[in-house]
């Protein structure tokens, strides 16, 4: 699971230096960073993490909306990562701004049984109000089979890294089982084009607009 260990989990705006996104098509940019010592470094989203690793996300969209980030851990426990009452409820994001999730005073630490963390990102054009912050783990007979991350041997030999191609941003299938709070949202955009640009992913809704909430999953693989 992902455990928030500090006082200010939230979305912190930071400066963005790259070219302006194409205004003709809705798009979301997402990057994964891991802390090494006192510094943060961008990593490949398919990297298999170690228990205890500290991570954060960098997020940007070229449309306005409200951001909700939830996690279904490998133990089956659901938790709301953002927004949360004790860590700030300001979850409105603005077009073209670069955001960090969580804010700098908070860390997300990888823990729990080996497997895949399902971090669900929902960007809605309107506020969806308050979401429950945590639910107990699912009963064992209701959980999906536990999948253990595996290294791609070809990539391992070439780059000396343990990478699992099943990790990273992915489309959420219409028949996939979601946490109850997300499953209630029937009108969500799940048909996305996902393009990798080095260690950054760009997601675009089918049709090019974000008139309905956009939902996608970011899988974190860990030992």
Image (cartoon, rainbow, N blue to C red):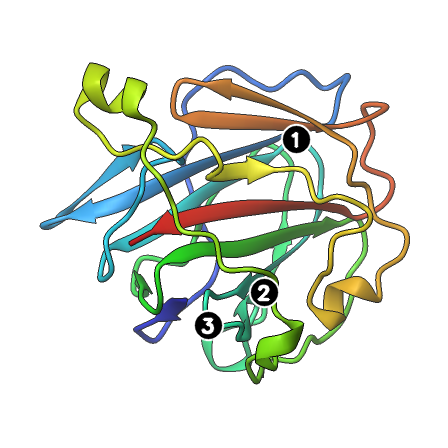
Report helix, strand or loop for mark 2: loop
Identify the image quadrant of residue 211.
Answer: top right
Report helix, strand or loop for mark 3: loop
Q: In which quadrant will I find the N terminus?
A: bottom left
Q: In this view, does 178 lie above or below 222?
A: below
Q: Can residue 98 be seen in this view?
A: no
Instruction: Tell me the distance, in whole angstroms, between the alpha carbons under discs 3 and 2.
Output: 29 Å
Q: Which residue lies furthest to the right in this view?
A: 187
- From the viewer's perspective, tell me whether residue 223 is left or right of residue 193: left
- From the viewer's perspective, tell me whether residue 178 is left or right of residue 99: right
Query: Mark 1 packing: few (<14 Cα in 10 Å), some, or many (20+)?
Result: many
At 22% across and 14% down in the image, what residue appears? 158
Residue linked to disc 1: 62
Q: Is residue 209 visible?
A: yes
Q: Which of marks 1 and 3 is in front?
A: 3
* Position of residue 37 measured from the top left corner of the image (x, y, whole percent): 9, 50
- From the viewer's perspective, tell me whether residue 100 is left or right of residue 179: left
Q: In which quadrant will I find the C terminus?
A: bottom left
Residue linked to disc 3: 75
Q: If you read the primary sequence from the N terminus, does the residue marked by circle 3 or circle 2 appear first?
A: 3
Q: If you read the primary sequence from the N terminus, does the residue marked by circle 1 or circle 3 appear first?
A: 1
Q: If you read the primary sequence from the N terminus, does the residue marked by circle 1 or circle 2 appear first?
A: 1
Residue closest to the eye, 220 or 156: 156
Q: Is residue 66 above or below residue 182?
A: above
* Position of residue 175 measured from the top left corner of the image (x, y, whole percent): 81, 50
Residue linked to disc 2: 90
At 61% across and 62% down in the image, what residue appears? 144
Q: Do the residues labelled 1 and 2 touch (CB within 8 Å)?
A: no
Instruction: Tell me the distance, in whole angstroms, between the alpha carbons under discs 1 and 2.
Output: 18 Å
Q: Which residue lies furthest to the left in this view?
A: 37
């Amino acid at each position: 699971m992902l455990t928030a260990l500090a006082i200010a989990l939230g979305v912190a705006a930071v400066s963005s230096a790259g070219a302006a996104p194409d205004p003709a098509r809705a798009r979301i940019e997402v990057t994964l960073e891991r802390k090494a010592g006192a510094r943060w470094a961008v990593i490949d989203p398919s990297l298999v993490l170690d228990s205890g690793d500290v991570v954060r996300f960098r997020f940007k969209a070229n449309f306005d909306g409200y951001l909700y980030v939830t996690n279904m851990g490998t133990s089956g426990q659901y938790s709301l990562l953002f927004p949360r009452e004790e860590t700030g409820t300001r979850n409105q994001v603005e077009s073209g701004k670069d955001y960090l999730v969580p804010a700098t005073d908070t860390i997300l630490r990888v823990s729990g049984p080996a497997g895949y963390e399902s971090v669900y990102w929902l960007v809605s054009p309107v506020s969806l109000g308050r979401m429950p912050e945590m639910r107990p783990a699912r009963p064992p007979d209701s959980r999906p089979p536990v999948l253990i991350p595996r290294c791609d041997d070809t990539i391992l030999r070439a780059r000396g890294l343990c990478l699992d191609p099943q990790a990273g941003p992915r489309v959420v299938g219409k028949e996939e089982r979601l946490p109850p709070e997300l499953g209630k949202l029937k009108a969500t955009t799940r048909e996305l084009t996902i393009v990798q640009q080095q260690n950054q992913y760009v997601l675009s809704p089918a049709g090019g607009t974000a008139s309905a909430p956009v939902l996608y999953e970011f899988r974190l693989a860990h030992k």
